[in-house]
Image (cartoon, grey):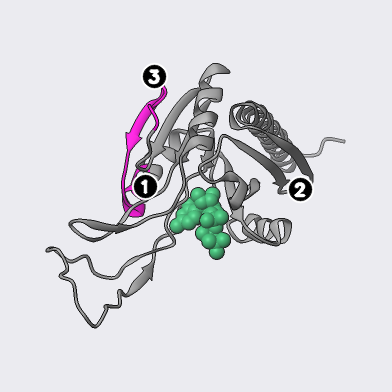
Amino acid sequence: MTFLITAGPTREPIDPVRYISNRSSGKMGYAIAEAALDAGYDVILISGPVNLAPPRDAKFISVSTSDEMFEAVHRHAGASDVCVLCAAVADYKPAQVSPVKIKKNADGISIELVPTRDILQSLGRQRAREFLLVGFAAETDHLEANAAKKLREKNCDIIVANDARIAMETDENELLILFRDGERKKISRAPKTFLARELVKIFANSQQKRLTKKEKSSKEKNSEEKEALSPTLY
Ligand code: CTP
């Protein structure tokens, strides 16, 4: 089984020396990558800029902007069985990137921001996808309601919700996991390395279940088609 995992923040350039980013450390995504490797799976880790060493046995793809992450994810998702989009992708980027350093201005400046492409949603829109699609939801309020909305709108199989104030830049987290069929699971506060091992088990099981269900329904469809084609003998 191959896990594709995105991790860390993205950087959206303003000019050659400045960018917009966020406080994501990448620790949760890297822990999931390590846990998946330990469980014997192949891992493609697509990471924004972080201060962590890439896991030795992963295929490691380093990106900076949301556009680079979008391209890398789409290049590799088709060959993956589980896509875990853990990265804190910037929601906006400057409409224009200045090719030269913007000079200080006594009047202040405004920067026009435009939305970035939503990578998770773009994968959720692939109708015939074979992979399990897992998103993360970083919230500061109405955790469950906001996470359930993301699960629906981005058409994921699983959303892992966490409180951004607990999760950002720390070694611990607590999780609420929402499944497409309405099931929910809570994991109380624990080191990210422990949570990662639990998540990898949950993701692998869910993908296995999906495949079994798909196989069963395609077998049923085949036998219905055969029945419809074969002449009735009396
Ligand atoms: N995500 C993504 N591409 C984006 C923005 C988010 O793939 N351009 C993914 C994240 O990797 C995560 C999920 O979408 O798996 C939810 O990210 P989050 O920041 O919690 O939510 P947003 O959709 O950005 O919404 P909001 O910031 O309004 O909560």
Q: Amino acid at mark 2?
A: Asp
How packed mark 2 is, by other alpha carbons closer than 10 Å (few <14, some 14-19, many 20 or more), is few
Total labels: the figure holds 3
Mark 1 C-beta to ligand 1 under 8 Å: yes
Q: In the rendered image, which residue does mark 3 sit on?
A: 56
In magenta, the rendered stretch is 52-72
x and y percentages locating residue 127 in the rendered image: 55, 52
63 part of magenta stretch: yes
Residue at which label 2 appears: 181
Residue count near mark 1 (Cα–Cα under 10 Å), binned few <14, some 14–19, many ≥20 = many
Would residue 121 be found to the left or right of residue 212 on screen? Answer: left
Q: Position of residue 185 (x, y in %)?
A: 77, 41
Q: State the residue at coordinates (72%, 61%).
A: 145
Is residue 8 a member of the stretch shown in magenta?
Answer: no
Q: Amino acid at mark 1?
A: Met
Of labels 3 and 2, earlier in sequence is 3
Residue where numbered disc 1 is placed:
69
Query: Which mark lies nearer to you, 1 or 2?
Result: 1
Q: Residue at x 58, y 44 (%)?
A: 167
Q: Nearer the viewer, residue 196 or 21?
A: 21
